[in-house]
Amino acid sequence: MRNWGKSCVKWSLALDSNHGPHTGGCGTCNPLVTVSESSGAVNYAIDYYTLGQYSKFVLPGAVRVYSSNAPGFVSVAFKNPDGSKVLVAYNEGRSPTSFQAVWGSQSFTYSLPGLSGASFVWSGSQKGGYTVSATSQIQASSYNDEFGLETETTSDSGGGYDVAYADNGDWAHYKSVNFGSGVGSVNLRTASAGNEGTLEFHLDSFTGALIGSATIPVTGGKPGRRFPLRLRERPESMICTWFSRGRRVSET
């Protein structure tokens, strides 16, 4: 749902332990519920519970609104037709971890057990905007907009998504990045299975002023080393893919 999808279809609802019965089509689809042919025991898959999270709180006619990801956490947010907001967050790690959700000038902190998710619902009007500190670890999948890119599950131990399948001219847009003072470089972590490429940083839009660039080395498709990029001037909003200051970026 973070990639402009309007709906999500779960297929099939209930099958036996051999992924049947079916009349052709998908013979390996995982159902929401598996019923044992021998004992009649019912097993509820993880999709059964995730569907429950979404269908209970995300109402028909809801639209997806921006939310960022954090190290070890993925999220998606919606605005319902009645004006209420819904945030669905998932801890991809195996240990209990706390995260902070910020909505304008308001925020809350919550701790999620490992490999678990939760939905949060609230109403009202947002007061104030938001900024993202450039000195924090900014996940590549937390873009506000993109062109030509795709996300996929990363192999990193902390989980999350990487931004992949980039071609010439593709871009990701990250808004409201606050560089404050004293920040003049960016650490990158990349992977490339083919030829070397170039990653460019622009101000405000993909046609904005170029403030820096870096060569993407060939890593054989595996996460590469991080390396610094010196910025020519302090940006407020930028086009880029993976970035962090002084810390390792968990996305590849």
Image (cartoon, rainbow, N blue to C red):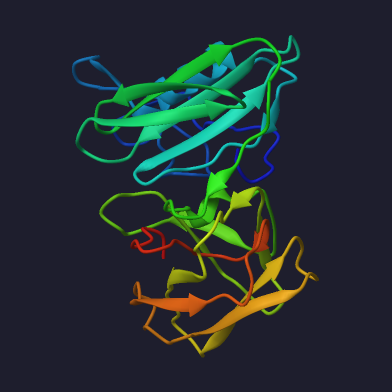
Residue at left 41%, top 65%? 252
Determine whether, in the image, residue 40 is placed left or right of residue 45: left
- Can the viewer see residue 163? yes
Residue 8, percent across and down?
60, 33
Determine whether, in the image, residue 75 is placed left or right of residue 93: right
Determine whether, in the image, residue 119 is placed left or right of residue 240: left
Instruction: Reply above or below: 241 against 11.
Output: below
Pick the front one: 134 or 227:
134
Residue at left 55%, top 49%? 142
Determine whether, in the image, residue 89 is placed left or right of residue 147: left
Residue 3, percent across and down?
63, 46
Residue at left 74%, top 9%? 82
- Can the viewer see residue 20? no
Residue 200, percent across and down?
63, 77
Please state, as top left, top right, bottom left or bottom right, where the N terminus lies in the image.
top right
Pick the front one: 170 or 44:
170
Pick the front one: 103 or 168:
103
Instruction: Reply above or below: 42 against 210.
Output: above
